[in-house]
Amino acid sequence: MTIWQDLLDKAQSVQSREIADLFEKDNRAAGFSRESGPFLFDFSKTNIDAETFDLLVKLAEEKQVAARAKAMFTGAKINETEGRAVLHTALRNLDTDVFVDGENVMPEVRATYARMVDFARDVRDGKFTGQGGKITDVVNIGIGGSDLGPAMATLALAPYHDGPRCHFVSNVDGAHIHDTLAGLDPETTLVIVASKTFTTIETMTNAETAKRWMAGKVAEPAAQFAALSTSAEKTAAFGIDPSRVFGFADWVGGRYSMWGPIGLSLMIAIGPEDFADFLKGAAAMDAHFREAAFKDNLPVLLALVGIWHNQFCDYATRAVLPYDQRLARLPAYLQQLEMESNGKRVSMDGKDLPYNSGPVVWGEPGTNGQHAFYQLIHQGTRIIPCEFMVAAEGHEPDLAHQHLLLVANCLAQSEALMRGRTLDEATEIMRKKGLEGAELDRQARHRVFPGSRPSTTLLYPKLTPEVFGGIVALYEHRVFVEGVILGINSFDQWGVELGKELALALAPVLSGEDAGEGKDGSTRQLVARIRALRG
Ligand code: F6P
């Protein structure tokens, strides 16, 4: 525990140090930035110094991050609580054979990928049609990892979207599917039911609703359905022809699944060529993660900065702030990726964690966030490490001046967070406005920014499919490294089970079939009021 203790001591001792002062000593910007492929990751605006950096890298070594990564990439069953391998990386490194239980899993992955490509082409070219002709709209019905990935990616890659319109329905709230289907023509709509298990109540309920909607106008509704799932029996029972079922193995975790069949809606939207570039970008990040020394390894560094802030400095949350409107769903995607993966209170061997689990992740695209919650980030009492990301260039050449303003805002925020504004500076500003005495002091204090608030910046040339694939893979591996350092299993999600079970038991209580005896007083009161209001 000595490296851990050294880092705790270090965090204590540098607590009151100004980050900005660190820049006076050496070429800090270059020393605390790293490049890989299209990415520059700048973590110089944090309180990490050379000694802390060395300790953090040693921590990653001590925790066997390299050995665990190798185990993951080569098909070992590192998801120990479910007895599964973790091989989402196999979905984007199609030329490399991988063995699970002695069997090469890649021939099947490649065959399914080829079928996806054919189907996506057929839908895009009008060879696969609905009863009313060429498919105009695709509705992906899924939730969690079967929704967030493709929904986020389809928005991110909007400039490459030249296929049918894509819609995403996730919530069991009937409003979601109602409002989505409202403007669509069943005769030219393809419904994709995306569910690894094909049992998730939200997805199956919405899928049945979509089938009924389709049946109102289409003679053979199931013919306009496709399924993405690990369960061939269940998709068959739903009535979907195996030619439109795209399967995958249990070693693809839900929140890591958009690289394979779960990405079908994205492939139909942007086309197989751009989808291949998206995989290529992720594969390049995989190679970098496997090969680069820890001190130059972007996912490892992102993880070490995260661990430093959460476990050692005790900053409970981190904000992800893409200055990229098309990454609007990235924070939500990362919430699942990070919090479902590393929100665990026991270690792999079932013991209580002696430190914090993964952090709360949240965020919004800039500049919108600036006009909402940045106030608290700048002047609140809690410190919130910020992760900025921005492209040097946008996709709209005629709006280049707006992009420049966007980038200026991004850089200004990290500068403001670090520099802050002292009481002297604030006093001077207010004195110039004519204030004096006690009122000058009072007003000046409201305008002080404490500064020394840490942030990192990920810079990339442009949000292309390749760059976007790299960003997602970067975050996936970051979560993996943090999980290894914390000694937890990042690949199960038992914490979502209890609520699901109780919801199933509550439905008959709400409908009156079950008296709900044994429920607590609060739940019974709410049920009674809801039943009375529903009449
Ligand atoms: O919320 C739990 C979870 O299992 C997620 O991990 C998963 O992404 C989501 O439900 C959807 O599951 P499925 O793809 O099996 O419908």
Image: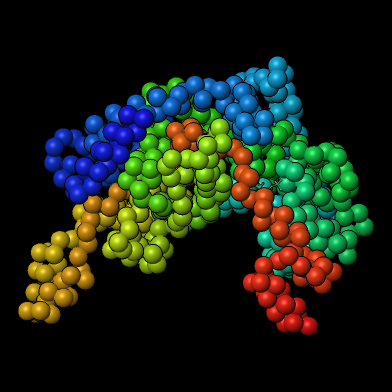
Image position, residue 213 (x, y; %): 83, 63
- Locate residue 154, reporting x and y percent: 59, 50
Q: Is residue 184 left or right of residue 30?
A: right
Q: Nearer the viewer, residue 348 or 242?
A: 348
Instruction: Examine the image and state in which quarter residue 175 appears.
Output: bottom right
The number of callouts visible is 0
Location of residue 383 in the rendering, given as x and y in whole percent from the top left corner: 32, 55
**Residue found at the far right of this picture:** 219
Q: Residue at x 49, y 33 (%)?
A: 487
Q: Residue at x 76, y 67 (%)?
A: 517
Q: Would residue 467 be visible to someone looking at this image?
A: no
Quadrant for the N terminus in the image? top left
Residue at image point 32% right, 46% down: 313
- Front residue (pair 243, 199): 199
Q: Return the residue nearer the eye: 77 or 334.
A: 77
- Residue 409: quadrant of the picture: bottom left
Tell me if residue 447 comes above or below residue 461 in the rendering: below
Q: Is residue 219 left or right of residue 269?
A: right
Q: Is residue 4 visible?
A: yes
- The residue lying toward the viewer, choosing from 465 and 319, is 319
Task: Give the image location of residue 88, x and y in percent.
Answer: 61, 33
Quadrant (top left, top right, bottom left, bottom right) of the C terminus = bottom right
Which residue, as the protein is rendered here, is positioned at the far front? 518
The residue positioned farthest toward the left in the image shown:
437
Tell me how the rendering is colored. rainbow
| Residue at (12, 74) in percent of width and height | 441
